[in-house]
Image (cartoon, rainbow, N blue to C red):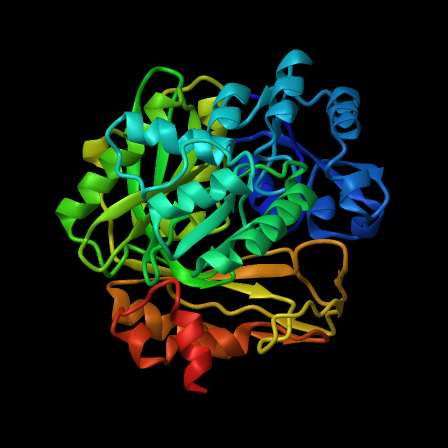
């Protein structure tokens, strides 16, 4: 086992990793930008190193600064969290070259699954259903038009190197293809440094269901059930739950096996998530694989009793998986609400100083956050303040518990998305489990 781990991230996920390491008797090193000098992860870590100015490109995305911090502090491993460099194959490769263990999959696996078009080919070649679409990034408008005729409308343009809703455009008619293609490519280039895009048939009202997997270095893997992430805005998740109210045991097993097939084909190791779209007839289609820990991992922890971050560290240290597939049992129901410092109606960032912060508590309530009274929410990064996670005996109890937890939560000094979540949790369609990626659209139309 490692004696010291550097966390190449910030915010609630850095705090989460520090806590897991402490329970494994591992010392931690925090890195921080000048804007995060007073951040909670800096206060909780055993050591902290400033790596640059506030802008992420000059700090949290600066590979040389992070590697230098690991070397001068003697960290044996680096945990990238999510976002920033977590899915950067070059970063994983540099860690390996410097003799530092990257707590995640290999650079080759990240590279393979990070190219969304290539990932589709991998899935299809191993019998996992994929939506009709291009097998390679489109070369030009002429090829895009030919593919569009074959795929049909509506279709969606996606960034090959993308994620988080960036570089995506839905096209409903041939006459808008050219402008949508240019816009998606430009957005992809700006967000990922890669303008490559591909085309795929668009499902107009699907569920977004993902499968959590763990793979060790000894050829063993398990799937840990699913998370329903259908409540989204512009392809960015807002609320998640496990298990999905739409899955049967047989469908869960089929999707779990499909996820493991994709991971095995990629030679995958560590924690990862295979994402699917699910239509109203119970048909599922591979969408992509996220080669990192997910923001929404706590709901899986709540229903399985497993600590996924500890599992990541142990796998990276060469230990075998602590469970077999037969050991995995889903107990109860869990929900997670992402609390962002944003205007709850327009979803615009609301940076500023927290003048009051009261977290909820009581049975079955967990809060993953880096916020505290006096904390200043900086304007440079994602606006996530934290996550409220609940666990109940069943879905109804979990919903009531989340309603109660959010009612208890008090955050002053900035606007938050708590009012949005309170609306969702009381909406008849959500209460009945009738959700899809168009849920927010319908909620807005009804107002």
The one nearer the camera, 47 or 59, is 59
| The image quarter in which residue 306 lies | top left
Check the image and report above or below for 293 versus 318. below
Taking the image as shown, residue 431 lies to the left or right of residue 136, namely left
Task: Count the marks.
Answer: 0
- The answer to whether residue 280 of the structure is visible from this angle is yes
Taking the image as shown, residue 181 lies to the left or right of residue 303, namely right
Check the image and report above or below for 279 versus 41. below
Check the image and report above or below for 345 versus 90. below
Q: Position of residue 158 (x, y in %)?
A: 50, 46
- The answer to whether residue 423 of the structure is visible from this angle is no
Q: Position of residue 16 (x, y in %)?
A: 56, 46
Q: Position of residue 62 (x, y in %)?
A: 77, 33
Residue found at x 58% / y 37%: 196
Specify the farthest residue to the bottom. 447
The one nearer the camera, 58 or 39, is 58
Q: Position of residue 136 (x, y in %)?
A: 46, 31
| The image quarter in which residue 279 lies | bottom left
Taking the image as shown, residue 7 lies to the left or right of residue 353, namely left
Residue found at x 30% / y 76%: 429
Residue found at x 38% / y 34%: 120
The one nearer the camera, 411 or 135, is 135
The one nearer the camera, 431 or 218, is 431
Specify the farthest residue to the left. 250
């Amino acid at each position: 086992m490692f004696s010291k781990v550097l966390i190449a991230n910030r915010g609630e996920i850095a705090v989460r990793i520090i806590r897991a390491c402490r329970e494994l008797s591992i010392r931690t090193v925090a890195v921080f930008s000048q804007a995060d000098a007073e951040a909670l992860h800096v206060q909780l870590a055993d050591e902290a190193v400033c790596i640059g100015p506030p802008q992420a490109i000059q700090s949290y995305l600066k590979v040389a600064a992070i590697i230098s911090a690991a070397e001068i502090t003697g960290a044996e491993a680096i945990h990238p969290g999510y976002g920033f460099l977590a899915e950067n194959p070059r970063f994983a490769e540099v860690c390996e070259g410097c003799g530092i263990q990257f707590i995640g999959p290999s650079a080759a696996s990240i590279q393979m699954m990070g190219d969304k078009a290539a990932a589709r080919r991998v899935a299809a070649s191993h019998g996992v259903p994929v939506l009709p679409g291009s097998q390679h990034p489109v070369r030009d408008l002429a090829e895009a038009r030919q593919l569009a005729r074959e795929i049909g409308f509506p279709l969606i343009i996606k960034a090959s190197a993308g994620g988080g809703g960036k570089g995506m455009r839905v096209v409903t008619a041939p006459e808008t293809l050219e402008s949508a293609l240019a816009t998606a490519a430009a957005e992809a280039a700006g967000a990922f440094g890669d303008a490559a895009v591909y085309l795929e048939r668009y499902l107009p009202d699907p569920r977004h269901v993902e499968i959590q997997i763990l793979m060790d270095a000894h050829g063993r893997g398990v799937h840990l059930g699913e998370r329903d992430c259908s409540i989204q805005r512009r392809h960015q998740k807002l609320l998640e739950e496990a298990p999905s109210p739409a899955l049967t045991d047989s469908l869960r097993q089929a999707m779990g096996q499909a996820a493991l097939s994709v991971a095995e084909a990629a030679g995958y190791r560590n924690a990862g998530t295979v994402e699917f779209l699910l239509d109203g007839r119970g048909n599922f289609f591979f969408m992509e694989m996220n080669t990192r820990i997910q923001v929404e991992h706590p709901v899986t922890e709540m229903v399985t009793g497993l600590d996924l971050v500890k599992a990541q560290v142990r796998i990276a240290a060469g230990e075998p998986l602590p469970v077999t597939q037969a050991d995995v049992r889903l107990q109860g129901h869990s929900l997670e609400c992402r609390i962002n410092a944003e205007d709850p109606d327009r979803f615009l960032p609301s940076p500023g100083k927290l003048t009051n912060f009261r977290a909820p508590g009581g049975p079955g309530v967990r809060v993953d956050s880096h916020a505290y009274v006096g904390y200043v929410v900086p304007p440079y990064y994602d606006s996530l303040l934290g996550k409220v996670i609940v666990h109940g005996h069943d879905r109804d109890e979990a919903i009531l518990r989340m309603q109660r937890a959010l009612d208890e939560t008090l955050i002053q000094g900035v606007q938050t998305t708590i009012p949005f979540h309170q609306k969702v949790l009381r909406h008849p369609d959500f209460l009945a489990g009738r959700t899809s990626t168009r849920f927010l659209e319908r909620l807005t139309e009804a107002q």
